[in-house]
Amino acid sequence: MKKILFLLLFLAVNILVKGQVIVTLNLPEPCESYQTSVFDKPEGKRAGFDFEVFPNPASSEFTIRVSASEKIGRLKVQIVSMYGNIVKSDDFYSENTAWIKTSGIGDLSPGVYIVTLFRKNEEVSKRLIIK
C-alpha cells in the first residue's frame, strides 16, 4: 500500500513540475491482456444493447440506431466534448428492441465528441466526429 501511495505522489509531483510523465510497469507473468480501447468492453462483459452513430463524421445532423436483446425501456443519450463538458443530454423510452433517432448538431463546434447511451446499469460509448 505504501508503494502505491508513493507512486501516486511521485506521479502528481512530476505532472506538476514537468507536465508529463512516462511510467513503465513491470508486471509478473502470466498477466491478463486488456483491451486498449476505452470504447470497448472486454468479451463476455458486453452490455445487453449496442448502437451505431452515422454519418460519422457528421456536419449538421447524425442518427443513432439502437438494438437490444430485450425491450429497450428508458434510455439516456449524452454527448460529451473532449473537454468533458456535457453538450447534449436527452431521455427517451421505447417498448421495442430497436430504436432510431436523428438529432441536429449544427450548434456544436467541429471536433471529436463521445456519445454515451445509458440503459439500466449499462452504458456504451462511441466516438462522433463533427466537421
Image (cartoon, rainbow, N blue to C red):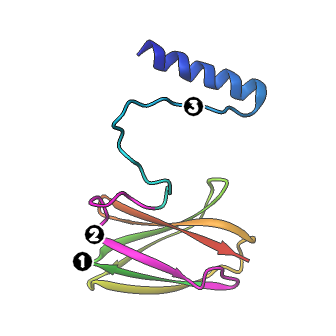
User: Element under label 2?
Assistant: loop
Check contact, mark 2 vs mark 1: CB within 8 A.
Answer: yes
x and y, in percent, of residue 62 in the image: 58, 84
x and y, in percent, of residue 82 in the image: 65, 57
Q: Quadrant of residue 76?
A: bottom left
Viewer-proximal residue, 109 or 47? Answer: 47
**Which residue is found at the position 72% from the left and 34% from the top?**
20
Residue under numbered circle 2: 48
* Mark 3–mark 1 distance (CA, rounded to whole Å): 41 Å
Viewer-proximal residue, 41 or 26? Answer: 26
Q: Earlier in the sequence, mark 2 or mark 3?
A: 3
Image: 53 above or below 33:
below
Viewer-proximal residue, 115 or 90? Answer: 115
Look at label 1 and name its amino acid. Answer: Ser
What quarter of the picture does the C terminus occupy? bottom right
Residue under numbered circle 3: 24
Asked whether 53 falls inside the magenta stretch, the response is yes
* Mark 2–mark 3 distance (CA, rounded to whole Å): 36 Å
Question: Which mark, by number, is residue 69?
Answer: 1
x and y, in percent, of residue 56 in the image: 61, 80
What quarter of the picture does the N terminus occupy? top left
Look at label 2 and name its amino acid. Answer: Gly
Of badges 3 and 1, nearer the viewer stands 3
Look at label 3 and name its amino acid. Answer: Thr
Q: Quadrant of residue 88?
A: bottom right
